[in-house]
Image: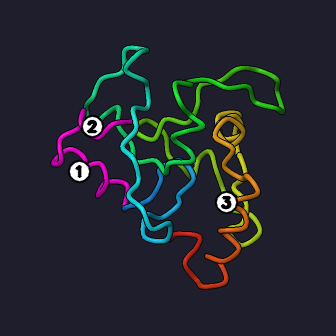
Amino acid sequence: MSRSYISARLRQRVTERAHFRCEYCQTQELIIGMPLEVEHIVPKTAGGETDEGNLCLACPRCNCHKGMQTEAVDNVTGHSVSLYHPRQQNWHDHFAWQDNGLVIAGLTSVGRATINALQMNNPYVRRSRELWIENGWHPPN
């Protein structure tokens, strides 16, 4: 998403509220070496507003894979469910770390669908997480 739609002040509030990490996969801004993106949870094209209640911080990977999606299929139930909503839901209710932080596990249909849609355990991020774990930088507290 273009930063031109979001004031510097609003971006700072969203960033601080997220503790400088992706609100989907929990990747920390500091360890990827680039700013995270402010993302519309409900896309503007679907009627989402540019206000704090509809904005979250996302890594470029999660933001790219999420795109305009608001729903995805849970591979266990086969049902389409809403994706995880960082403003309305608690991360730990839907996700948990496995293998010392290498893998994000879905605890609910929302968690599983979000992990699959955003490709939160793709091979590239798993290799990065291995290095982050070895250095004691991951998973975040």
Q: Are marks 1 and 2 in contact (CB under 8 Å)?
A: yes
Mark-to-mark CA distance, 1 and 2: 8 Å
* In-image side of 88 versus 118 (left or right): left
Residue 13 bears which disc, if any?
1
Residue annotated with mark 2: 52
Residue annotated with mark 3: 125
Q: Depth check: 28 or 19 in front?
A: 28
Q: Quadrant of the N terminus?
A: top left
**Residue 67, percent from left and from top:** 53, 30
The residue shown at (57%, 53%) is 25
Q: Depth check: 4 or 122 in front?
A: 4
Label 3 packing within 10 angstroms: few (<14), some (14-19), many (20+) = some
The residue shown at (46%, 47%) is 58
Snapshot colouring: rainbow
Q: Looking at numbered disc 3 in the image, what kind of residue is underneath it?
A: Val
State the image quarter where residue 51 is shown.
Answer: top left
The secondary structure making up most of the magenta span is helix
**Residue 19, percent from left and from top:** 37, 61
Q: Which residues are magenta?
A: 1-19
Q: Looking at numbered disc 2 in the image, what kind of residue is underneath it?
A: Glu
| Disc 1 secondary structure class | helix
Q: Earlier in the sequence, mark 3 or mark 1?
A: 1
State the image quarter where residue 48 is shown.
Answer: top left
Mark-to-mark CA distance, 3 and 2: 28 Å
* In-image side of 66 versus 131 (left or right): left
Q: Depth check: 55 or 38 in front?
A: 38
